[in-house]
């Protein structure tokens, strides 16, 4: 809970100071941005998209425009100021088929088999329980649904211990690909793949990557 409170306060400050409002995700302010996720996601009108760690809502709203009013875009974030900002943007743009929930990605406020795509940009690495995140994503996805994540991965072994500052900077919570893949497999996903966006270890022992998986 101490780390969770720190992350809420940290990203509240980032938003208020204008350092966490890009489509590259909040880690972009730490030099570890995961880039633009949506070009890697197969979206079409009528689909239901869930964005984990939706932050100020820009990627969720872009997804909403792609799926159109016959679809639905749902953002979930832990930080109240992020959710408030995203809801204000939604109202200002008149995108009534987008919605934002104040909730944890480890405990999604959605029923089973309710979404077609789960996306996330540089947010899963912030979770202390990634196994639960993937289990929840699997639960809410419909059969044949896609999980597409842009995230920070670690190259090399994890050091002992962590700092709250390092975790918020998208470093101390990052996993090596073997662990990440294993957690996805244990959740039930198939067709798991990773596409590094930078050479592994290029950014001080870390690298951004796009991860894909399918619910059978």
Image: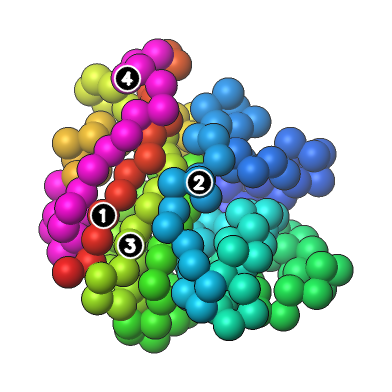
| 4 or 1: mark nearer the eye | 1
The quadrant of the rendering that contains the C terminus is: bottom left
Q: Residue at x 69, y 41 (%)?
A: 22
Q: Which numbered tag is attached to residue 213? A: 1
Percent across and percent down for residue 20 are: 69, 41
Residue closest to the eye, 140 or 70: 70
Marks 3/4: CA–CA distance: 24 Å
**Helix, strand or loop at mark 4:** loop
| 3 or 4: mark nearer the eye | 3
**Helix, strand or loop at mark 2:** helix
Which residue carries the number 4 mark? 200
The numbered mark, 3 or 1, whose residue comes first in the sequence reads 3
Q: Residue at x 72, y 80 (%)?
A: 96
Please give the range of residues in magenta: 182-202
The numbered mark, 4 or 1, whose residue comes first in the sequence reads 4
Farthest bottom residue?
111
């Amino acid at each position: 809970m101490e780390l969770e409170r720190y992350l809420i306060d940290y990203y509240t400050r980032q938003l208020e100071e204008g350092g966490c409002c890009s489509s590259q995700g909040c880690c972009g302010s730490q030099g570890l941005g995961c880039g633009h996720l949506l070009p890697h996601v197969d979206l079409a009108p009528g689909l239901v998209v869930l964005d984990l760690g939706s932050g100020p809502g820009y990627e969720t709203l872009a997804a909403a425009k792609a799926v159109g009013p016959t679809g639905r875009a749902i953002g979930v974030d832990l930080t109240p100021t992020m959710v408030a900002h995203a809801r204000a943007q939604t109202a200002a743009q008149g995108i009534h088929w987008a919605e934002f929930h104040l909730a944890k990605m480890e405990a999604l406020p959605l029923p089973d088999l309710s979404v077609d795509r789960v996306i996330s940009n540089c947010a899963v690495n912030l979770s202390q329980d990634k196994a639960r995140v993937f289990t929840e994503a699997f639960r809410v996805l419909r059969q044949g649904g896609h999980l597409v994540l842009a995230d920070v991965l670690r190259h090399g072994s994890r050091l002992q211990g962590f700092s709250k500052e390092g975790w918020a900077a998208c470093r101390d919570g990052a996993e090596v690909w073997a662990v990440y893949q294993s957690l996805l497999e244990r959740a039930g996903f198939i067709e798991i793949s990773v596409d590094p966006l930078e050479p592994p270890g290029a950014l001080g022992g870390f690298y951004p990557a796009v991860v894909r998986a399918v619910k059978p």
